[in-house]
Image: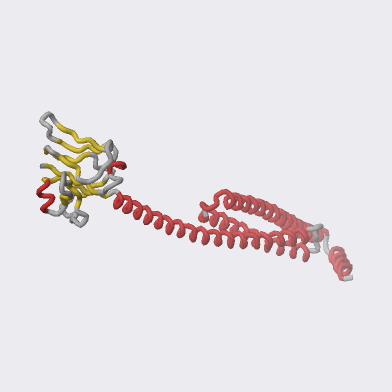
Amino acid sequence: MKSLFTLFSAILLFVSCTPKQAVQIADARCDSLIRVINEKDSLISAVFSDIQLIAENLEAIKARENLIVVSAETEGAKLPTNKLNEDIAAIDRLLQENRNKIAALQSSVAKLRKANLRIEGLEKMVADLRKQLDEKSEEIIRLHNDINRMSAEMTTLEAQVVEHAAQVQTLGNEKTALEERLNIVYYIVGAEKELREAQIVDKQGFIGRTLTVNRNSSLASFTQADSRLLTEVPIGHKKVTLVTTHPEGSYQLITNDDKTVIKLAINNPERFWEASKILVISFK
């Protein structure tokens, strides 16, 4: 009824005007109508542009999500958390951009509705986009929590690795020290009389008395060596006797032309020291 009244008033105004005025009124109304149409076209174009951008952003979000999943599955303990956090930050920016676009869309839809212009399915499309955005936001929150959890687990694992490495180093040092102690040997070369006076050797028996090592003797006057590195012992005397017991074939007494024993050469260190870690060589 109001529209009819408006139309009737316009007709009366048109009829009451001069031809020139009527033309001017018609032109003004035409310009106004064109502006309205242009505004509606611009609004509709902006709506579909925003929809297209939102769709592109959702595809970009999906691609980055796939990249994050692949990285998390393939890297394992070497998870690049910094890179993943950068990807999530990029997704957050895309999500925020979509939120802004959807808010603009909702405003545009309201303006179209106010202008009595409804595009089939547009409101449902905007609602669906909003739902997708909310779902993506929840997924990103879960992804962010998962990465934080994995980062914390990695930090714990790294601390355990450092601790285990320290334990291994300690055990290695202890093993090295033990091996060094196990391979410590002592030797001394001296005149028989001096060795007896120093209570390093004793003479036992009545007939053909033999030299034996005094088990209570101090090792202070002995030379300490590593059985793995000791290959020879200088002697430089005649009438040499090995007081301690060492298997035949594991060593050799090297002499010169005048029967002077130059040195004792150890051919098989492991066998040579198996019976005694002490070597006592006497000479007369």
Residue lying furthest front: 207
Give residue 254's quadrant in the image: top left
The residue at the point 38 percent across, 55 percent down is: 171
Q: Position of residue 211 (x, y in %)?
A: 17, 47
Looking at the rendered image, the quarter that the C terminus falls into is: top left
Report the residue at 77% width, 66% height from top. 114
Q: Where does residue 176 sit, x and y in percent of width and height? A: 33, 51
Quadrant in the rendering for residue 121: bottom right
Position above or below: 254 against 140: above
28 or 223, nearer to the observer: 223
Residue 80 position within the rendered picture, expressed as x and y whole percent measured from the top left: 52, 53
Q: Is residue 81 left or right of residue 132?
A: left
Is residue 28 at all visible to an observer of this figure?
Answer: no
Above or below — where is 75 with respect to 114? above
Rendered position, 68 above or below 110: above
Left or right position of 242 against 22: left
In depth, the one of 259 and 30 nearer the eye is: 259
Q: Left or right of 277: which side holds 155?
A: right
* 19 or 75, nearer to the observer: 75
Instruction: Judge left or right: residue 35 versus residue 88.
Output: right
Where residue 17 sits, quadrant-wise, is bottom right
Which residue is farthest top?
A: 257
Q: Nearer the viewer, residue 202 or 187?
A: 202
Residue 2: % across, % down: 87, 70
Badge count: 0
Which image quadrant: the N terminus?
Answer: bottom right
**Visible residue check, residue 259:** yes
